[in-house]
Amino acid sequence: MKTNTRNILAFALLAGILCGAPLRAQEEGAEGPAVLDFAFKYFKRSNGLYELKAVVTTETEDGYVPVRDLPIDFTHLTDADPVVLGQVKTDYDGVALLMVKPEDIVYRDTGGLMGFTAGFEGNEAWDMAYEEVYVKDLRLTMTAEVVDSVKTVHVTAHYIKGDGQEYPVNEQDIFLFKQGMLSKLQIADGWLVEGECDIEFPEGIPGDKDGNVALFVSVLEHPDFGNVEVSETVAWGVIPNYVTEESGLLWTTVAPTWMIVLLIVLLAGVWGHYVYAMIQMRKIKKTGPKG
């Protein structure tokens, strides 16, 4: 009787395991494709091209990590069917970048808004992702000139409406940057009135060996215009004071005086210890037991 009971219990346990396996598999399968974190940005570059940038990541136990080799479709929205601009796969950092020419823009609404989309249609591994961006086409210009002995950057800013006409931008911050070693550094700002403003170039800004400075005028994260920049190189920078050979720095052919003196002292110390050791050895030899 005890044996039968054990057999029944073992059979019930085995049946539970076999029945539970499909249920677990069903639960695991019910999780579905992984969710993507999708960011889409617009940037109008100095060369007049529209930069469409999608950044794709996903959340893991170690935080957000980039999703690579994911095909991202970019389109331009019109009053009819969307115009396909291209497909780009995400790179090592999860970034898909597409540069669009101005002549590829075929539609703006009456307010001047241009519509762009970036999206992934989804597959077994990843869920679908989609985002739209609407911006007005801002046209920035900058002119560098000296006005009454003051180095001045003159800026104009106009946007285009659906009728193709340009309209001035009013009461808007504008920022002046210079190119640094790793990123752009803000050096001044201005305020647009009727689409124009003058920004005074600060004195003492370092340039290259010829005094050239790469300047950028930018509108950043604007709700209507997004990110827009123009650039120009001017010879307004301070020329670095490069040191000549006569100064005796470490990388010149002439050694500095302090280094020569230090080398003499070190060599004198080494040779002094050598001579002292030789003298001591001769004394030990003389005072040693004679055979």
Image (spheres, rainbow, N blue to C red):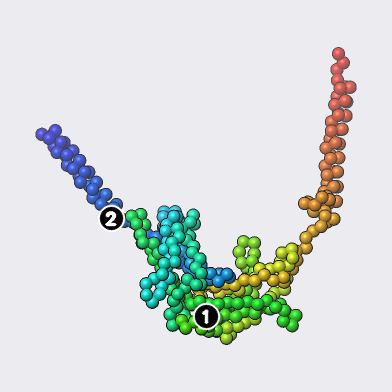
Classify 198 as above or below 185.
below
Q: Residue 223's mark?
A: none
Q: Position of residue 135 (x, y in %)?
A: 47, 75
Q: Quadrant of residue 143?
A: bottom right
Query: In the rendered image, is residue 255 in sight?
Result: yes
Viewer-nearest of discs 1 and 2: 1
Residue depicted at x 62% and y 82%: 197
Pointer 1 and pointer 2: residues touching (CB < 8 Å)?
no
The 10 Å Cα crowd at callout 1, few under 14, some 14 to 19, many 20 or more, is: many
Q: Residue 159's mark?
A: 1
Q: With 99 as the anchor, is 231 left or right in this view?
A: right
- The amino acid at mark 1 is Tyr
- The amino acid at mark 2 is Ala
Residue depicted at x 85% and y 26%: 281
Q: Secondary structure at mark 2?
A: helix
Q: Position of residue 99 (x, y in %)?
A: 51, 66
- How many marks are shown on the rendered structure? 2
Q: With 169 as the anchor, is 64 left or right in this view?
A: left
In this view, the residue in front, 99 or 189, is: 99
Q: Quadrant of residue 148?
A: bottom right
Question: Who comes first in sequence, dot 1 or dot 2?
Answer: 2
Residue denoted by label 2: 30
Q: With 80 as the anchor, is 20 left or right in this view?
A: left
Query: In the rendered image, is residue 171 in sight?
Result: no
The 10 Å Cα crowd at callout 2, few under 14, some 14 to 19, many 20 or more, is: few
Q: Quadrant of the C terminus?
A: top right
Residue depicted at x 47% and y 83%: 163
